[in-house]
Image: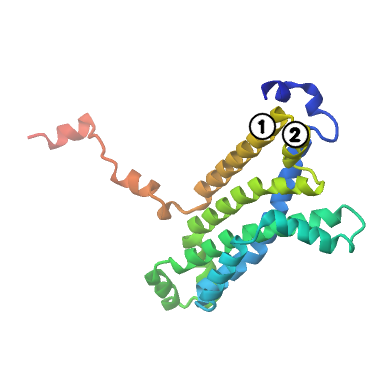
Amino acid sequence: MIDYLIDPAHWTGSDAIGVLIVQHLVYTGIALLVAALIGVPIGLYVGHTGKGTFLIAGVANALRALPTLGLVILLVLIIAPVFASELAFVVPSLIVLVLLAVPPIMTNTYAGIRAVDASAVDAAVGMGYRPLKVLFSVQVPCALPLILSGFRGATLQVISTATIAAYVSLGGLGRLIIDGRAQNDYDQMMVGAVLVALLALLVDLGIGIIGRFAVSPGLTRRRIRSATRPTTPSPASSALVAP
C-alpha cells in the first residue's frame, strides 16, 4: 500500500489520487448542500411549530432503509434515457447521497429546536419577539450543537457512501476500490479504503473545529470550567488576609 501511495505515476494524469480526492469532496459537498436546503427548513418548521412531528420520524426511517447501491442502479436505468451526457450517472448518484444525508440533518435540526429551554423562548416572547425572531435569535443559536452534530453524522455517511459513484463509472476514491477489485489489486483497494477513512476523519475534525468557534461558549462547558476552576491566591493577597 505504501509503495502504491509513493509511486509518482499514481499522482499524475486524469485518474491521479489528488484528482479523485477532489472529485470525492465535490460529490460530498453538493450532496450536503442540497440536503441542508431540504432538511434544515423542514426541521426548523416542525421543531418551531410542533406540526408534522410524526412525518419527520416516518420520512427519516424510510430514507434510512433505502438500499443505496440498488437505488443508484435503478435511477440510472430511469434517468439515462433523459440525459445523453455524464449527467445520466451524476444525477442518480447525487440523488442517493442527498437522500442519505437528509435524515440526520432534518431530525437533529428538529430535535435541537425542540430541546431549547422553554423559559428562554417564553422570555423572548415576553420581550416582544416575533415568531421568526424567536426562531433565529433564540432557538437556532441554542440548537446549534445538535444541528452541527447532524451535519457531522451526515458528512461521515456521505463521504463513506460516495464510493458508489465509481460503480456507475464516475470518479472519486471509489474508483480505486472498484478498479482494484476488477484487477485483483488489493494494494489499490486498501489505498482507496484508507483514504476514504482518513478523508472522513479530517472533514469531521474540521466540522468539530468550526463548531467550537460557532457555538456560543454559554452552551458548552468551557465557560463553566473556567469559572469554577480553583485559583491559587497570590502572596500579596495572602499577606492582606493574614492575622
- Does the image show residue 218? yes
Q: Amino acid at mark 2?
A: Gly
Direction left: furthest residue: 243
Q: Which quarter of the figure has residue 124?
A: bottom left
The CA span between labels 1 and 2 is 9 Å
Quick check: 11 left or right of 40? right
- How far across and how far down the image is residue 134, in percent? 50, 72
- Does the image show residue 33? no
- Is residue 30 depicted above or below 11 in this figure? below
Tell me the tag on residue 180: 2
- How far across and how far down the image is residue 176, in percent? 74, 36
Tag 2's secondary structure? helix
- How far across and how far down the image is residue 183, in percent? 78, 32
User: Earlier along the polypeptide chain: callout 1 or callout 2?
Assistant: 2
Q: Amino acid at mark 1?
A: Met
- How far across and how far down the image is residue 112, in percent? 48, 63
Residue at 49% from the left image edge and 53% from the top image edge: 215
Residue at 52% from the left image edge and 61% from the top image edge: 108
- The crowd level at tag 1 (other Cα within 10 Å; few <14, some 14-19, many 20+) is some
Quick check: 80 left or right of 69? right
- For the N terminus, the image quarter is top right
* Marks 1,2: beta carbons within 8 A: yes
- For the C terminus, the image quarter is top left
Residue nearer the viewer, 103 or 36: 103
- The crowd level at tag 2 (other Cα within 10 Å; few <14, some 14-19, many 20+) is some
Quick check: 235 left or right of 48? left
- Is residue 46 depicted above or below 74 in this figure? below
Tell me the tag on residue 190: 1
Tag 1's secondary structure? helix
